[in-house]
Amino acid sequence: MYHREIRCFDCHQVHGNQNTANLITVGNAVCLSCHTKENPAGLKGTVSEHTHHAEGSAGSQCVACHMPKIEQTIKDNFVSAHTFRFVTPAETEQSGIPNPCTSCHIDKSTKWATNELKGWSTTYPWRVMQ
Ligand code: HEC
Ligand code: HEC
Ligand code: HEC
Ligand code: HEC
């Protein structure tokens, strides 16, 4: 998003407010202000069609899959990844970087997650399989 000139202040209030991390608004609204269906960068369907989880589910929060708390600053202190890119289960197998699916579904394997993603018509197989 940086390449499209999205900056910190598009999501964070510069002078601070009541919200977590001084976000302009809370929850999926932070993302959905831009990623609307009308917008070329928007989701192709509804939120639950995109996330494959029920609308109110923890697995339907944009940050759950696009900003998992995996970036370690100092020991035992994890902050939210700000690349927004979805880390695939296959990348976990290749390099050990945690993917959001099995970080939340801790009882499941990366093979399970890859297999589930295969059925997601909203994603490009060549991107989520590797
Ligand atoms: C597209 C929206 C967006 C942009 C742009 C963005 N952030 Fe964030 N940031 C978030 C969200 C959402 C959270 C909270 C994540 C959560 O709830 O897990 C967050 C959390 C944070 C936090 C709190 C610590 C943490 O990791 O939870 C800091 C600090 C932060 N952002 C700094 C920045 C800085 C500095 C920039 C610019 C370089 C920036 N952010 C750009 C959306 C954004
Ligand atoms: C101020 C507008 C704005 C906000 C707010 C915003 N985005 Fe974006 N986002 C964009 C634009 C513009 C692009 C680039 C689309 C393109 O290049 O086609 C983009 C691209 C993306 C991409 C694709 C990245 C890629 O490399 O292909 C993801 C994933 C994404 N955003 C997730 C999020 C999430 C999660 C949030 C909320 C934390 C968020 N965005 C908030 C405008 C926004
Ligand atoms: C359960 C996981 C999950 C959740 C939750 C999720 N996404 Fe995604 N998202 C994905 C996957 C998987 C991709 C495809 C990644 C790829 O093709 O590299 C993706 C791709 C995207 C893209 C790139 C364009 C596209 O449609 O392929 C954008 C933009 C995006 N998501 C925005 C969002 C927003 C906004 C939310 C919250 C309303 C959200 N996502 C919630 C998993 C998720
Ligand atoms: C933040 C937590 C979270 C993340 C991240 C998440 N899920 Fe889920 N998932 C849930 C919850 C909670 C449920 C239970 C049903 C519901 O709320 O929709 C669920 C249900 C499911 C189900 C149906 C029930 C089952 O266990 O068979 C599948 C399949 C699934 N998730 C796959 C995925 C995949 C694939 C990803 C990564 C793209 C993912 N989930 C990411 C929390 C998460």
Image (cartoon, rainbow, N blue to C red):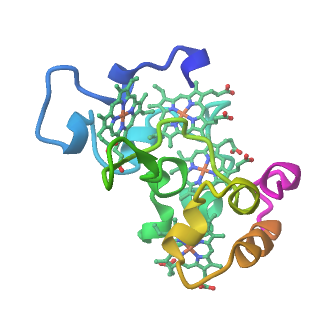
Residue 71, position as x, y percentages in the image: 44, 45
Q: Is residue 94 above or below residue 40?
A: below
**Residue range highlighted in magenta:** 120-130
Instruction: Reply yes or no: does residue 96 show up in magenta.
Output: no
Q: Quadrant of the C terminus?
A: bottom right
Foreground of the two, 66 or 93: 93
Question: Where residue 82 sits in the image (x, y, percent)?
Answer: 47, 36
Percent across and percent down for residue 102 are 58, 71
Residue 118 picture quarter: bottom right
Q: Quadrant location of residue 74? A: top left
Viewer-proximal residue among 39 and 72: 72
Ligand 2 picture quarter: top right
Q: Residue furthest left?
A: 18
Residue at 49% across / 67% down in the picture?
A: 59
Vertical comparison of 85 with 62: above or below? above
34 sits left or right of 17 in the view: right
Residue at the limit of the structure toward the right, as seen here: 126
